[in-house]
Image: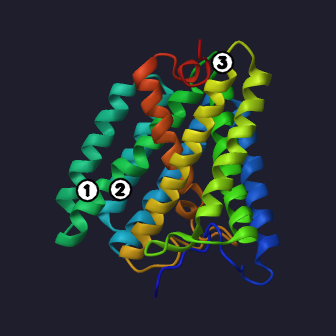
Amino acid sequence: MTGKNRRSFGSTSIFDGELPLRAGTAFLLATLAGFLTYSGVWPFTLMIAAGSAILAWEWSRLVRNAPMDSVFYVHAVAVIAACISTGAGAVWLAMLALGAGTLLAAVLTQTRGARAWSAFGVVYLGLPGILLVLFRSDAAFGIAAVFFLFLVVWSADIAAYFTGRAIGGPKLAPKISPGKTWSGLAGGLAVPTLLAYGFAVWLGDTRVLAVALLGAGLAFASQIGDLAESAIKRKFQVKDSGQLLPGHGGLFDRVDGLIGAALAAGGIAVARNLSGPGEALLMWP
């Protein structure tokens, strides 16, 4: 298989009858994610922990073609423990769980070519979970920070898809994801920037231009996350990371952009004020 991404930005065609299915699935996921985010730190934490375990299963299937092997259980336990520890306020324990899981995944993987990928997956899919729970745990700005990330990532995904499909033009990375175009990239940056500007106006007490530029940067990071997943799937010659979500493939196919944006947002929080990550992300003097 060529591994062509079913979520290609700027595709000149889509699968017949698939758009309503994709839209329906995305709407249900967004509604569930929004409800659990609003419900509190622990409902959100449990959602992220469950999602991280599903990603561990898909990663095992992707890099080892063995979704239920011992390495999967190590990966899943590590990321679940990391999320729960972060929700409980023990970030140091979360990082310890992630480090131990990474080491054990490398030791237990029998196939040499998959050993580094198995270990890398624990960090790559586990660290964003820690960061998302950390953002939501910010008492003052947690809900706003998470919804801001959702707004940027989802709008970048939608705008890039439809802009690229409507305009077309030169391919962005034909060897990685043939459907993505430069016009899709432009649309996927412009719309989140405008929405981030509006979000900052609604939020108040922050520098609106800074938040708008932040939206553009996180949108770019989300598209890098999308390209990274496409490159990984192409390396292992698979089309989708799974079949869990109708019209989208696997969960990894759906949250690849969120992974990139969460990592970028986490870097900002670390640089500015990790004890108040939501404030560090949104409040600019």
- Which of pointers 3 and 1 indicates the residue nearer the eye? 3
Residue underneath mark 3: 207
Residue at screen point 40% across, 23% down: 271
Q: Earlier in the sequence, mark 2 or mark 1?
A: 1
Question: Mark 1: few, some, or many residues within 10 Å (few <14, many ≥20)?
Answer: many
The disc placed on residue 105 is: 1
Quarter occupied by residue 37: top right
- Which of pointers 2 and 1 indicates the residue nearer the eye? 2
Residue 231 image position (x, y, % from top left): 41, 68
Residue 281 image position (x, y, % from top left): 56, 25
The one nearer the camera, 150 or 218, is 218
Look at label 3 and name its amino acid.
Arg
Q: Are marks 3 and 1 in contact (CB under 8 Å)?
A: no
As drawn, the residue found furthest toward the bottom would be 1
How far is disc 2 from disc 1 in space, using C-alphas? 9 Å
Q: Earlier in the sequence, mark 3 or mark 2?
A: 2
